[in-house]
Structure formats: structure tokens, C-alpha cells
Amino acid sequence: MKSYDLVYIVRPDLEPDAIKAVVERVTQRVQDQGAKVEAVDVWAAPIPDRPGGLAEGLRALRDAGADLQCIIARREPDQPGKGVVFVTPLQGDQEIAAAAQFGFIAAHTVHSVRVSGRDRPGIAATVAQRIAEAGISLLGLGVQTPGSSIGLMISQAQNLVSSHPWEILLPAGVLAIIVLCFSFFGDGLRDAFDPRSKD
């Protein structure tokens, strides 16, 4: 009998209790479809950004008997030549040991919810509709890109200092100007309200 697995990536800012609540809400909407809903760990490992880099990591998991149901690989935009792969699930000591040997670790900032059950035509659309009826947006479950900030820009530019040193100049310059402005503002307040400065 064929089965299906739908894996949804959950926002990284959710606490464990919030993830549990998501599982419960989804379960309430799809249990009449014979579906099983559970939170599963996502495992991540660095990989070289070259042909065969992903295959090396997956080969190690295959040899350990892992039956992966979700694989996401991408380049690291701030680290040329490097990438990262996310997989789920890993079950049993043998699979986890093989994953750890290659460099996989549990990604505590990425969580996923898996919906599984007996496969039949249109089941994915039915499950998605039931989840929507629960008021859960699949887009809302997606990983959100962190907002831009001066600190984040400087942090990312540190990895590019040797190849693109100008990337750090703008955010560092803006930060220096902000610090100077606060310093001048503080001096102005002191001059205005410190009685000793008027003597």
C-alpha cells in the first residue's frame, strides 16, 4: 500500500510549546483522513559547493540505511564554495552516528512537521485545505529571512574582508556616524543642563 509524506518547515522563532500547538491543530483537521502528524528533527551539515558535494553526504546516510523523506540543499551566499544540506528524518543510533561522522547536527533553529498516511489521488490538496481551515498558512510556517540590520551586515561582511573588503565599509561607516552622533548629543545635553559648564 502506497503512503504519502508531507513535510512542512516551521518558523525558527517558534518555541517548543508553539510547535506542539501547531501539531495539535493540524492533527485535529486531518485525523479523519487517517493521517499521522508529528514534529520531526531537521539535521544539517556543511557541504562543498561543487559537483558531487551533496552526493557525498547522502551516500554516508544511504550506507547507514537512512530513508530520507525531505532533502533541501542550498549555497551559503556569504561563504563562496560552501553550501549546507538539511535532511529529515534520521532514526536509530546507526543513522545518527553516520550522520554525525559526516558533520550532521540537529538544526535547533529549523523545525518541521510531518503529515503522513495512505496515499490516494488528491490527498495533498485535501490535507492542504484542511490545514487552511485550521487558520494555518503554509507560507506562515515557512522560514523567514531575518531583517536587515547594521550588525547583521557587518557580521556577514566579516567573511568577505579578504575578497570584498568594501562590503564592510558602508555598514561600519554608518555605525561610526551613529556613535559619533550620540556622543555629540550627549555633550550637548551636558553643556545645556550641567550648571558647572556655565561657570
Image (cartoon, grey):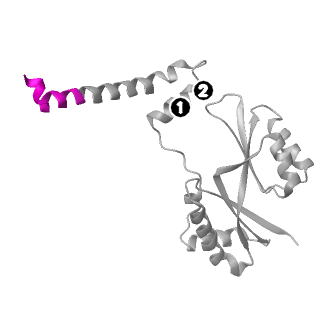
Could you tell whether 98 is left or right of 32 in the image? right
For image coordinates 59% across by 55% down, the residue present is 142
**Residue hosting label 1:** 155
Determine if the magenta segment contains residue 195.
yes
Does 58 appear above or below 138? above
In space, the residues marked 1 and 2 are separated at their CA atoms by 8 Å
Q: Looking at the magenta stretch, what is its main secondary structure?
A: helix
Please state, as top left, top right, bottom left or bottom right, where the N terminus lies in the image.
Answer: bottom right
Q: Which range is magenta? A: 186-199
SS at badge 2: loop
For image coordinates 82% across by 40% down, the residue present is 102
Please state, as top left, top right, bottom left or bottom right, where the C terminus lies in the image.
Answer: top left
Res. 66 visible in picture = no
- Front-most of residues 22 and 72: 22
Q: Quadrant of residue 22 in the image?
A: bottom right
Q: Where in the figure is residue 91, as x and y percent of width and height?
A: 83, 58
Q: Where in the figure is residue 122, as x and y percent of width and height?
A: 72, 71
Three-letter amino acid code of the residue under disc 2: Asn
SS at badge 1: helix
Q: Where in the figure is residue 170, as x and y percent of width and height?
A: 44, 24
Three-letter amino acid code of the residue under disc 1: Ser
